[in-house]
Amino acid sequence: MQNESKKDNALTVSQLTELIKTMLESSFQNIILKGEISNYKPSSSGHLYFSLKDSDSQISAVMFRGAASALNFIPKDGMLVQVRGKITVYGPRGNYQIQVSSMIEAGAGNIMEMIEMRKRKLAAEGLFDSARKRTVPFFPKTVGVVTSPNGAALRDILNIRRRRNDKVSVIVFPAIVQGENAADTIEYMIKVANEYNMCDVLIVGRGGGSLEDLLPFSEEKVVRAIAKSKIPVISAVGHEIDWALSDFAADVRAPTPSAAAEIAIPRKSDIESNIENFKSILFSEIQNKTNSLRLMLRNFDPENMQTRLQNIEQKYSERFDKAFDSMKDAIENIIKDKRIKIKLCLQNLENCNPQNIFDRGYSMVCDENGKIIRKSSELSNGAKIKIKPAEGLIFATVDKTN
């Protein structure tokens, strides 16, 4: 009987859940909660699903379309917010959550603040400069992919490669893309691809996830490895709304891994179509050129060839005669000018000839050593002198000076 009594007192799971639901929902009807948004997932119906967390704990949250429509900002992972709402319990899973009725921004979350600080630091070093970004090759032979070998991102890339161009090879560099060791493996695989020059373009990324899941792609070591890569890098992290610091360091940012594959791998049918078009254009150009040359050659038959050559020769002959006459006149003018200059120089030399001065009655007096005497004070009585008139020499002795 005692065992039967105990059985009658046992609660069902639904009863316990209903008791907890009643207690929680009646006790927490209007609470204000501050936390960092994580794993934000807006639905197509307009409802917002996310988690609020701090350094130690987290709680699921939902904001229905009516309340969400009143927001004056767009929530995102890492944002620090303050919400007002009530605690509700979802019986089928036994989970409790906060149903948010209003939400305001409360500043930057810890993760976002850390990423922003890191972004400013790396930007100041020039790692994000557009001048250092390179162009992705138009037709790579090999595309490298640094991602999880088991993830949806790789499957999407391989499917797009199969659909667009099966002539392009894909090398997978397997990496852990979330968690404690993710940044180390991503950095290592980027370095391996570069050290052995294993591909023409490198896709680095993963599928969508929470801000924490994408955090390895914002680690400083990963960003620096991308910036140092000699191989052009396409960053493809998460979905359209997601971003990481690898997006800023990469040569190209793709909104999704699938988009990265479409950027890196040209569509083979487009290339073949372009080749056919260029082939047609080239053939048409050759035909037009050939026909044009045939028409030109008809004008050079033997009957008028001599006339054409004579016309050409006459034109150049006239130019030659004019150039010859012009050159002859120029040389004659130069010779005439030189002769005039030479005549003037001879005249100047003639005017400066000392003999002409002697011919006019002047003489030059020297002492016995040949020194020219310019003043009487330079001689004393009895000094021997030489006098040079226009012709001959006179030797004399000084009797008196004045």
Image (cartoon, grey):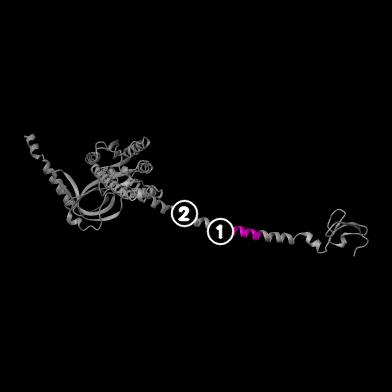
Inspect this view and state whether residue 396 appears.
yes
Q: Which residue is mark 2?
A: 317
- Residue 208 appears in the figure: no
Magenta-drawn stretch contains 253 = no
Q: Residue furthest left?
A: 1
Q: Of label 2 and label 1, which has the lower sequence position? A: 2
The percent coordinates of residue 78 (x first, y second) are 29, 49
User: Which label sits on residue 89?
Assistant: none
User: In the image, is residue 172 above or below residue 372?
Assistant: above
Pointer 2 local density, CA inside 10 Å: few below 14, some 14–19, many at least 20: few
In what element is the residue under mark 1?
helix
Q: For numbered disc 2, what is the local secondary structure?
A: helix
Decide whether the magenta segment is chiefly helix, strand or loop: helix
Give the amino acid at mark 2: Ser
Q: Position of residue 81 (x, y in %)?
A: 27, 53
Quadrant in which the C terminus appears = bottom right
Distance from disc 2 to disc 1, alpha carbons, whole Å, reads 18 Å
Q: Nearer the viewer, mark 2 or mark 1?
A: 2
Give, as a single range, the part of the protein colored magenta. 330-341
Q: Is residue 338 magenta?
A: yes
**Residue beneath disc 1:** 329
In the foreground, 396 or 258: 396
Q: Nearer the viewer, residue 136 or 188?
A: 136
Residue 330 lies, in percent from the top left, at: 56, 58
* The N terminus - image quarter: top left
- Looking at the image, which residue is at 93% across and 58% down? 382
Residue 46 vs residue 227: left or right?
Answer: left
Q: Residue at x 49, y 54 (%)?
A: 320
Write down the quadrant of residue 230 in the picture: top left
Q: Amino acid at mark 1?
A: Asp
